[in-house]
Image: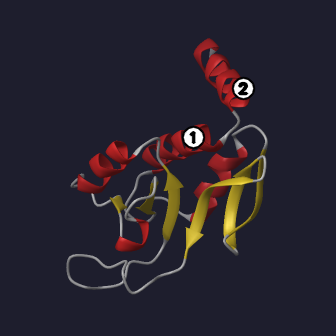
Amino acid sequence: MATWDDVRTIAGELPETSEGLGWGRPAFLVRDKWFVLRREPRHDAVDEHGERIEGLVVLYVPDLETKDVLAADDSGYFMTTPHFANSRMILVHLAAIPVEELREVMIESWLVRAPKRLARTYLESSLED
């Protein structure tokens, strides 16, 4: 399962990404816009037993429909809280998600936040590989 070090490795593979802060928390940014943010445990991030979930990151998704699909998934990788009710952000439980799955959702988050030209160039180069 994934760790913050995996987040760092994946982020380092994406163009024009830097490590910094988002909302005062550790984050990875593309041209000064964060696309993955380390989340401290909060009272509203609990599992089905009411236990706080640690090791969460926040990622952007393309739209609210995608968010709803991910949040309803039975895998236990994704969740949302009332705090994120009408936003295009989803919480990802690092200890639950396999690294390759994390890579996919991080790339998607990067694409949402990257400037359009940079995202297009990245996608075109990915197709060539």
* Label 2 SS: helix
Left or right side of 85 for 122: right
Compute the Cα span from label 2 to label 1: 12 Å
The residue closer to the viewer here, 123 or 66, is 66
Residue located beneath label 2 in the image = 117
Indicate the amino acid at tag 1.
Answer: Val
Residue at the location (37% across, 62% down)? 96
Residue 50 placement (x, y as % from top left): 25, 85
Please tell me which of labels 2 and 1 falls first in the chain: 1
Residue 43 placement (x, y as % from top left): 39, 87
Q: How is the image coloured?
A: secondary structure
Mark 2: give few (<14), some (14-19) or many (20+) Cα within 10 Å. Answer: few
Question: In the rendered image, which quarter contains the N terminus?
Answer: bottom left
Residue located beneath label 1 in the image = 112
The residue closer to the viewer here, 6 or 126, is 126
Left or right side of 59 for 50: left
